[in-house]
Amino acid sequence: MGSQLKVTVDSSNHVIDKNIYGHFAEHLGRCIYGGLWVGPDSTIPNTRGLRNDVIDALKRMSVPILRWPGGCFADEYHWQDGVGSHEARPKMINNHWGGIVENNHFGTHEFFDLCEQIGAQPYVCGNVGSGSIREMQQWVEYITFDGDSPMANLRKQNGQQSPWNLKYFGIGNENWGCGGRMRAEYYADLYRQYSTYVRNYGAERMVKIAAGPRADDYHWTEVLMREAGYFMDGLALHYYTRVRDHSIVIENPDRNRIYLPDPHANRGQAVEFDERDWFAIMKAAYRTEELVERHSAIMDRYDPDKRVALIIDEWGTWFEVEPGTNPAFLYQQNTMRDAVSAAISLNIFNNHSDRVRMANIAQIVNVLQAVILTEGDKLVLTPTYHVFEMYKVHQGATMASVELNTSSYAFGEETLPQISASASLDASGKLNITLCNVHPHGSATIDCSIGGYAARRATGRVLVSSSMNAHNTFDSPDIVKPETFTDVRIGENGFSATIPPMSVVSLTLEA
């Protein structure tokens, strides 16, 4: 059976926020040190310590926003240890990620330099779990105040005369877990207190983001919206697509959840997997829509005008680390399975962009579902990188509504929609449609009708492989990369296309 797609172009629709295509960099494994930062004295070509090859690749992908310094790391990070001369910065223990000692050479100045070099908005996550209100207030003052004050003068003394532009600030991270194992009611009160001191020192109004729920913890969303929704601009949902979960969940009488690590959990392998694990990740990726819809429904009751954004600032696949690597560094390879699952999630975010206005895949380099892997002076772009590069056409474009009646992909007794899709109209008048086929063996025929747009020409690109385990390596970096897609035929009211198995397709239509 073929799939029927209806795309409707309506200029009154909302814009897809470019920040849906955001990224996340935590002090974890080799994301910062060795991935983004090598230091100014490195033999690896760099600009002020930031490696040039990574910067160039991220610029080509058009990274709109970058979240830092965590993650769990954020609630143990004390920002004043990361400013001033590198030689004078105190070392610290990274308690969450392997207990390694860090030299704090990558701090506030280096992060804002990174954002400037790649053209991304900075998104800073503050320390609630082990920090203080004064510490958070002083960090905001240090970054954004243009005047005579202790923190502004310290910034100038450290070489930055003018304040930086900081629009997005997170009040803690996963405070139900590594950020303090708090109850929703307790964190809601802390959020109200801490956020008071995240002040607007400059002309830019700060977007204040509350630490939101883990996956399907709807109680957390209910409490935060009820008790603190008026004081927030965004609520951060975290959801990782796994073969199996990695936590033991304990339900307390007051309906709050406690998440404890499950020492017996196995997340499956990133490369050595079969169709059972392929299907499991596709199913987990599709579940993103259920989570977005149910959390949005709760938010709608307290915020019908959708002023508060649902922000998915940690998402992506999570597998066992690559054999022989540090288990605390979360280094995993990246296959066609990651690419297709990322395409599903991004289509969902596009289609719900009335409420979802930021998302940050975890993480940008060398950690979890990274878009870039490095080893010494070598660099490789992952299949997920290519999905983000293909999908960047949606950034800031006007959403076009999609109605999809798709054939199914069956495995065992379960089925999934075979096709996922989203669409948008860009500023130049081009209609961009992104599609993915989750079936690892069967192609999909699609007949698409288009309302409000008369397409005369179509071009396309496809990311595809004959193997679900296909991935790029340092020795063979181009095994999975986009190719020209030609199997599309323009008709009187739309187009028809044949989408190959386990593929991601981007079509551009012109009137």
Image (spheres, rainbow, N blue to C red):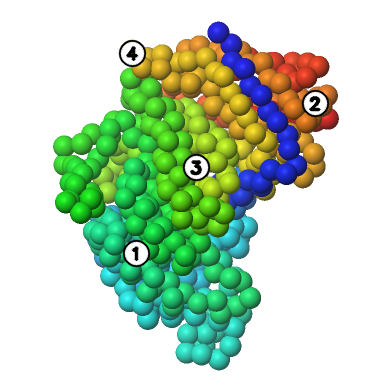
Q: Residues under labels 2 and 1: Cα distance?
A: 50 Å
Q: Which residue is mark 2?
A: 455
Disc on res. 413: 4
Q: Residues under labels 1 and 4: Cα distance?
A: 42 Å
> Tag 3's secondary structure?
loop
Give the mark nearer the N terminus: 1 vs 3.
1
Quadrant containing the N terminus in the rendered view: top right
* Up/down of 163 relative to 4, above or below: below
- Looking at the picture, which amino acid does disc 3 mark? Val
- Looking at the picture, which amino acid does disc 2 mark? Ala
Q: Alpha-carbon neighbours of circle 4 within 10 Å: few (<14), some, or many (≥20)?
A: few
Which of these two is toward me, 73 or 354?
354
Give the mark nearer the N terminus: 2 vs 3.
3
- Looking at the picture, which amino acid does disc 1 mark? Ala
Quadrant position of residue 28: bottom left
Residue beneath the point at 27% across and 49% down: 328
Q: Alpha-carbon neighbours of circle 2 within 10 Å: few (<14), some, or many (≥20)?
A: some
Q: Which residue is mark 1?
A: 188
Q: Which residue is mark 3?
A: 371
